Image (tube, grey):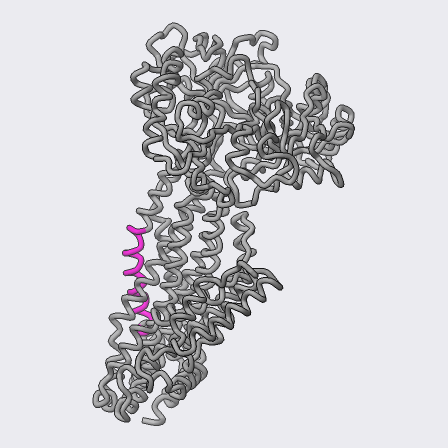
Amino acid sequence: MSNHHPPKLPLRFFRWFCHPDYREDIEGDLVERFKGKAKERGAKRASWFFAVEVLKLFRPSLMKNFIGQTQLNNYGMFRNYFKIAWRNMIRQKMYSAIKVGGLSIGIAACLVIAVFIQYELSYDQQYPDKDRIYRVIAEYNVSFGSGHFFSSYFQHPFARTIQEEFPEIEKAGRVNQSSLFGAGGNQIRPAGAEQSTYEEHVAYFDQELLQILQPEMVEGSLKSALAEPNSIVLSRTKAKQFFPGGSAVGQTLIFNEQTDNPYIVGGVMEDFPENNSMEFDILISLTDKEFWKGERTSWLNTNYPTYIKVKPGADIKALESKLSLITEKFHAQALADGGYATKEEIINGLTYHLQPITDIHLNKGQLGEDGFFESGIGQVRLFGLIAIFILLLACVNFVNLSTAKSATRAKEIGLRKTLGSSKAHLVQQFLIESTLFSLLAFVVGMLLAWLSLPYLGELSGKNLTFPATAWWLFPALLLSAGFIGVLAGIYPSLYLSRFRPVAVLKGGVSKGAKNALLRNVLVVFQFTTAIAIITGTVVINSQMDYILTKPLGFDKEQVILLRGTNTLGDKTQALKNELLALSAVENVSVSDYLPVYGPDSKRNGDMVKVVGRGDDQGVSIQDWQVDEDYLGTMGMKLTRGRDFAEQKGNNQNKVIVNETLVRKLGLDDPIGQKINNGNEYEIIGVVEDFHFDTFAEEIQGVILHQGQDNYSVISVKANTDDVATLLASIETVWNKFAPGQPMRYDFMDARFDRMYEGVAQYGDILNCFSVLALVVACLGLFGLSAFMAEQRSKEISIRKVLGASVSRIFKMLTGNFLKLVLISFVLAVPIAWYFMQSWLDSFSYRIDMSWWYFGLAGVAVTVVALITVSSQALKVAHSNPVDSLRNE
């Protein structure tokens, strides 16, 4: 016996419409057939067939007597309504095409955006206990560092301590995905293989976090896969890649040619889905892992995003408050001992929040380190709002054209009322016509959505698929088509059904049809929306242009980044020297600290104080290790002091700082001053500020000092336009030092562009929607102008006979529409200004709002509207008066 049950929505719909006399027998047959299908073809397909069968039964002969048996069974009347609706649609081809076309564009936009929003909302939904999993967030409101800020990073002992201190917490686990500690990109090969492959999605993971998330295990045990030091868990895809055709558990992998530190596979898990915040393929155990001596007990260094799983029924608000006890017992004293602030200031200024794991993806923007350009709830809301407005524009077109064409239906309505038709019958007639238009528009809209969804997926970087096989799609679209049809047709149907037969047959309605107050209001709404969206698009594109062309403080052009050099060991310096010998190479630097993001670009955080000023609370900084050729390779400019390259071998405990740090430390003459961040340094130079974060973030203080490390990136500054030849020369040199490892490279300017790929995609999508909004608005304007020209054709013919010029007639026909566009512009400017000013406030470095952004949008809409109206105005103005007056 199958345990599958029919889908609830279709079953409820059937029980609602089916007559009680037939319901029990028919429902039994439906359920029996569903279970048979479920057994043969699966529950998903059976649900789809069940929904289709229910829709087939939706006919008058089985319906309840909702509005009187006589009316319900009058099938011929409804069939007649459909015939009339179809004939009117065929007879008025242009208006029908505009109505269906506008609605279908609006529906397609809604469907496409709905798929996008559904995809965004589906993130992190696959975890079995997702309702009990939270990420811990710290909110700092203290005077040291950056003042008020949020952070999801915690100390090594934080997870263990909160699990021990608070019984509400079932488990707590950490992740470390920083390339600073060896996560991110790594060269990996199975033991015994010669060829390494580069893998980017590597992270350190606690065994406890693995048990919190509970990924499905293909091999190994969820309870012990990461329990041992140096154990790793692979995704199914990576396990097949490294160990095809055999078991991966127990096998050995070598990272970055460190043969003395092998990793043992403890388990294989199913791949994390694409719509998941944990984008990792390889998990390295954090068991007994200590990145430096003393880290396990330190309450100063924050390197670990921490997740918890609470026990069922836990009071989350109460737990958030109780977490402050950790600050009082451990964290505050450590910071106070470091001289950053008093213990009381830290206790009062540090609070904790628990963020549901399902909220992380859409709320990344609230945490500075998570990146401004990730998908966010604001973006989802904006796209949803745009979809609704485009659909409203399409409905406005429908209402406008329906009321405008009322004069052509006036005599029909008058005669039908004279012959006994009631107002209810007429409302039904016009609502059926509206619903027929809506159904056709939904069919066309679905086709447009299906065709355009891959394009939106490419623009947004998401794998968006149309849910064509979902059982709920057809019923949902049918109900939506009916709802939109009623919504768009309710006003025209009530308006037309109110006509009085006497007034109609005397011609009074024909004059009334020219009273265009409602139509003008709706046109203004359309163009206000279009101008606001286009203005927003212009502002976003201008901000992007500003980002891509603003001086950055470094030269990103013609810098080649050789990746994976950390596997070369002590041969790195020899490789650098041979690269410098190439005639097309201007400079070479070895360092992972780059002013652009990437999988192997390191970032860190630290605090620095001026030596001898005991009252200072410190300034937050980036502490970068570089070599003596770093500034020359990156094209950075010294404003004071000297470069490392000027006195090679004389740079121990010497640093170069940026202008922001000089300003924040309050140093009038920084050269020779000493600063301390745990190590004492002397300032020998000041470099001009350079952007190393997105433009959403203010430039932080930076110190650059020489240091030895096994870096994974060599930056090569080229001085030739023949980059292809240079790359071939570099590859020849590379093969001398790493013959078993393919050369991997990137360009710094390309990596910079990828930093802003999210905003570029955001702008491209808005460009598409702004064009759609303008097209829908102009479709309605074209229909209205054609109708008004048709209505006034006899008037215009008489004016021409009396001597009116073509230009005067053209001005008469277009003047009113241009006034409406001007009114729309006046209304759109403050709306667009408010929203775009709020968006620009998210950037620390941004353009200023200028009048020409609004002017450009206004002129563009005016020109398009004028072209739209002109086609009909010129046609009528050049027509022969005889054609209109011959029947008078």
Q: Visible in this render: residue 238? A: yes
Q: Is residue 449 above or below residue 508?
A: above
- Quadrant where the image shows the C terminus: bottom left
- Residue 98: quarter of image: bottom left
Kindly identify the residue that appears in the image at 35 percent across and 30 percent down: 319
Q: Is residue 705 left or right of residue 539?
A: right
Residue 301 vs residue 682, the one in the foreground = 301
Q: Is residue 745 left or right of residue 356?
A: right
Percent across and percent down for residue 429 are 35, 82
- Prevailing secondary structure class for the magenta stretch in the rendered image: helix
- Residue 411: quarter of image: bottom left
Percent across and percent down for residue 93 are 45, 80
Kindly identify the residue that appears in the image at 32 percent across and 14 percent down: 342
Percent across and percent down for residue 718 are 65, 29
| Numbered range of the magenta stretch | 812-831
Percent across and percent down for residue 490 are 31, 73
Residue 542 vs residue 138, the one in the foreground = 138
Kindly identify the residue that appears in the image at 32 percent across and 81 percent down: 791
